[in-house]
Amino acid sequence: MNPWVALKADTYRQYGLFSYGLLLKGVFTKRTFRVAVTMRICQGLAESYGFIKLLLPIFQLLHRFATHSAAMDLSWRTDIGAGIALTHGWGFVVTSKAKIGNNVTLFHGVTLGSRDRISRNGERLSEYPILEDEVWVGPHAIIIGGVTIGRGSRIAGGAFVMESVPPYSVVAGNPSAIVKCNCTPDVMNRAPV
């Protein structure tokens, strides 16, 4: 997805509408939104050509500063769909190889991490989580390995998820278990993407 279109959707998720004034307001007043903005700018510059691409190292540094000040570990290279909502942010860790869909909400303390497996022939296999569209992940939830969290699912705070989750499910506990099926997605200010 085009990073500039995704940035408009991120702003929409934050405020319920998009304007350049709201985008600037978010940059200066919301530390977690600032992380999303610097990430999208880095992604856009990385895809650009010519002189403008020379600005990438500057914005990479700004992104590092933004993530540090928000106490988040989120690479600008992470594949994140439009309309991301990063709520609170403190202690947030996402592997750069995770894939996150559109209109996803992630709370503080969330970990999206890799898991290594050793195959029968001794080869190391690294696996990374995939969050489909409209997933809601509560505070301090941990999702690791090559799991897919189905569209519209909700992961309760403190859940430890190592198995894939079907769409529209609610998952809770450690180890995690499906506690409800056919749930309604929890997406505040759903961005039109």
Image (tube, helix red, strand yellow):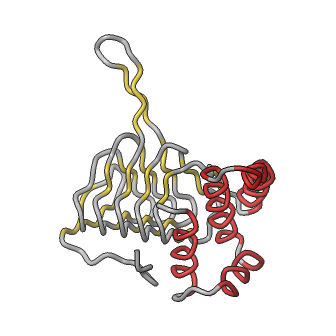
Q: Position of residue 15 (x, y in %)?
A: 57, 86
Q: Does the rendering let one see residue 117? A: yes
Quarter occupied by residue 186: bottom left
Q: Which residue, as the protein is rendered here, is positioned at the far front?
A: 50
Q: Position of residue 172 (x, y in %)?
A: 33, 61
Q: Does the rendering let one see residue 74? A: no
Q: Is residue 58 left or right of residue 73?
A: right
Q: Is residue 49 left or right of residue 64?
A: left
Q: Looking at the image, is 113 positioned above or below residue 171?
A: above
Q: Position of residue 153 (x, y in %)?
A: 31, 66
The residue located at (66%, 69%) in the rendering is 32
Q: Between 90 and 129, which is closer to the camera in this rendering? A: 129
Q: Between 71 and 179, which is closer to the camera in this rendering? A: 71
Q: Position of residue 100 (x, y in %)?
A: 44, 57
Question: Which quarter shows the C terminus?
Answer: bottom left
The residue located at (67%, 61%) in the rendering is 41
The residue located at (62%, 65%) in the rendering is 36
Q: Looking at the image, is 29 positioned above or below residue 16?
A: above
Q: Between 50 and 193, which is closer to the camera in this rendering? A: 50
Q: Looking at the image, is 82 positioned above or below residue 51?
A: below
Q: Looking at the image, is 191 positioned above or below residue 90?
A: below
The residue located at (56%, 68%) in the rendering is 86
Q: Which residue, as the protein is rendered here, is positioned at the far left?
A: 182
Number of numbered discs on residues: 0
